[in-house]
Structure formats: structure tokens, C-alpha cells
Image (tube, rainbow, N blue to C red):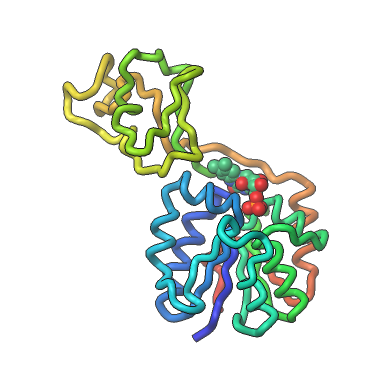
């Protein structure tokens, strides 16, 4: 059984795959997850926060540690220096965190863990999201070109966390959204308004959507940073969280 420190940064791409790998690992290994501030926000936007919470038992070395709670210099990051973890994984790793790693910056919880690992000779595995052109999925959003600003807005009415802001055209405030999906779930005929857009949904115009695919192209700077990090002693850059073996 290994003891794994796992850093998650604020990337939507490879986020679910990372949570899945943590779920698998936590069956036979101790896993402590360190969340950057952006990771906390993005996990919530993709509806994965509670899932991650429920995987980790909450006992010693099986915790979810948040930058928002204890800051970027979280004392628990010091466990890497104390030899409490056999290795560190950073997945998904945003281009932001990768750039900081490449240049020795440690001003967030995850970059701090990475620096501690390097200084303490703890092996690290990094999964940058921008190694290849990729397709990722958006969180929930309102397609403004389709929204006709109905006086009554059924998706806003069903939202349990009041994430719809209708003050300047209808928008979803992602910082409040928990990705429960009620705003796009099929509803019984008659519960929707205006137009039939195939399956009946709270928005009869099909203006509220989730999981839209967007293509992302790799920038030269991200490729260069991945090469720099891959050249560090004790660090392996891998393509997918599923490729990681303790
Ligand atoms: C919904 C959402 C998805 C994002 N996905 C990515 C991503 O796939 N890759 C990336 O590099 N940044 C992504 N970002 C931007 C990062 O969250 C942002 O650069 C942040 O500053 C990263 O901070 P961190 O590296 O400390 O986690 C996303 C932001 C949001 C709101």
C-alpha cells in the first residue's frame, strides 16, 4: 500500500478522469487530495465536488485539503518533507500550474506541494492538460442567441441554488452552480413552455445547455513548459491519470 498525495488544479479537461483514478486508488492506498483554489471552483462547476468528498474517508492521510481553508502554505503540505507520502501526482495540471512548476514558483497549495516534493526527493507525476489538442466539455450555460428572456424562466425556477442571474440578460453564475442538471432535465409535457425542442426540457427554446464540446489547441508555451518539467529530476510527465501506477 502506497501513500499518495494528489494535487488537483482548476482544469475541466481530465478532471472527471482524475477523480475516477482517485476513486480506484483509494480502495488500496492512502490518498490525500490537495485542491488549488481554482480546483475547488471548477470541481463544483462540473458537479464533482461531492463525489470526491465521498471517496476519501476523512481519516489521517485520506483527507481532502483545500487551499480556501488553510491557504497556499497549508501546513499539511509539509508532510511531503516529512516523508509521509511515497509520491505526488498532479492531475489535472492546468497550464497555469505547469508554468509555475517549470519556473520554480510555488504560490498555490498545489505548486507548494510540488516544490516540497522536489526539495524532499519525493517522486512526482504530472498530467498536463495541454499536451495535445483536445476536446473538453463546458459547464452549464445559457446560449444567449437562443434565449428569448421569457418573463417566467422555468430553468431558473427549478434551480435549487439560485444560480440564474436575470439582471442583465439570463446567465448562469457558475460560482453558484453545482451542476445538478435540473435545468436541462426532461420534464413532463405541460411543465415546459413555448416550443417543443425534441424532448421537453425546462427551457422550451433549448437555450440552457450543459456539456457542450469545445476544442482546445496546444500553445507553444505549454509544450515548452511540459518539456521543462519533464526534465526535472524525479518528475514524470504522463498523458492521462489512468497511466499513473503507484
Ligand atoms: C470551467 C473552467 C474550466 C477550466 N478548464 C481549464 C483547463 O482545462 N485547462 C486550463 O489550463 N485551465 C482551465 N481553466 C482555467 C484555470 O482554472 C485558471 O487558469 C486558474 O487560474 C488555474 O489555477 P490553478 O492552476 O492554481 O488551479 C478553467 C476554468 C474554468 C472556470
Compared to 125, does 198 lie above or below? above
Question: Dividing the picture into quarters, in which one does residue 106 lie?
Answer: bottom right
Quick check: can you spot residue 133? Answer: no
Q: Is residue 203 above or below residue 44?
A: above
Figure check: 208 above or below 43: above
Q: Which residue is drawn at 47% across and 26% down?
A: 171
- Quarter holding residue 202: top left
Quadrant, the C terminus: bottom right
- Residue 185 spot, x, y in % from top left: 29, 35
Percent of width and height locating residue 85: 60, 80
User: Horizontally, is 91 left or right of 210 in the view?
Assistant: right
As drawn, is 161 to the left or to the right of 138? left
Foreground of the two, 70 or 93: 70
Numbered-mark total: 0
| Residue 233 visible in rendering | yes
Q: Residue 149, image x and y in percent?
A: 40, 14
Q: Taking 93 as reference, is 229 left or right?
A: right
**Residue plotted at (42% across, 17% down):** 147
Residue 114 drawn at (x, y percent): 70, 68
Q: In this view, does 167 lie to the left or right of 206?
A: right
Q: Which residue is drawn at 70% across and 74% down?
A: 117
Closest to the observer: 95 or 75?
75
Q: Which residue is drawn at 35% across and 14% down?
A: 150
Amino acid at each position: 500500500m502506497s501513500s499518495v498525495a494528489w494535487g488537483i488544479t482548476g482544469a475541466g479537461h481530465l478532471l472527471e478522469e482524475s477523480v475516477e483514478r482517485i476513486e480506484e486508488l483509494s480502495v488500496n492506498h492512502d490518498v490525500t487530495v490537495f485542491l488549488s483554489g481554482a480546483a475547488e471552483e471548477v470541481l463544483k462547476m462540473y458537479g464533482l465536488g461531492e463525489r470526491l468528498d465521498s471517496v476519501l474517508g476523512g481519516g489521517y492521510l485520506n483527507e481532502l485539503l483545500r487551499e480556501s481553508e488553510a491557504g497556499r502554505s497549508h501546513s499539511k503540505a509539509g508532510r511531503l518533507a516529512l516523508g509521509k507520502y511515497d509520491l505526488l501526482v498532479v492531475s489535472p495540471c492546468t497550464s497555469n500550474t505547469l508554468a509555475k512548476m517549470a519556473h520554480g514558483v510555488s504560490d498555490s497549495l498545489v505548486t507548494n506541494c510540488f516544490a516540497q516534493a522536489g526539495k524532499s526527493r519525493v517522486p512526482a507525476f504530472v498530467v498536463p492538460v495541454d499536451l495535445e489538442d483536445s476536446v473538453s466539455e463546458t459547464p452549464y450555460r445559457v446560449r444567449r442567441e437562443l434565449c428569448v428572456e421569457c418573463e417566467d424562466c422555468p430553468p431558473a425556477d427549478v434551480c435549487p441554488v439560485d444560480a440564474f442571474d436575470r439582471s442583465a440578460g439570463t446567465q448562469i453564475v457558475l460560482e453558484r452552480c453545482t451542476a445538478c442538471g435540473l435545468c436541462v432535465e426532461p420534464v413532463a409535457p405541460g411543465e415546459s413552455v413555448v416550443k417543443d425542442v425534441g424532448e421537453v426540457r425546462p427551457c422550451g427554446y433549448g437555450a440552457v445547455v450543459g456539456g457542450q464540446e469545445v476544442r482546445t489547441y496546444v500553445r507553444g508555451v505549454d509544450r515548452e513548459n511540459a518539456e521543462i518539467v519533464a526534465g526535472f529530476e524525479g518528475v514524470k510527465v504522463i498523458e492521462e491519470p489512468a497511466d499513473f501506477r503507484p
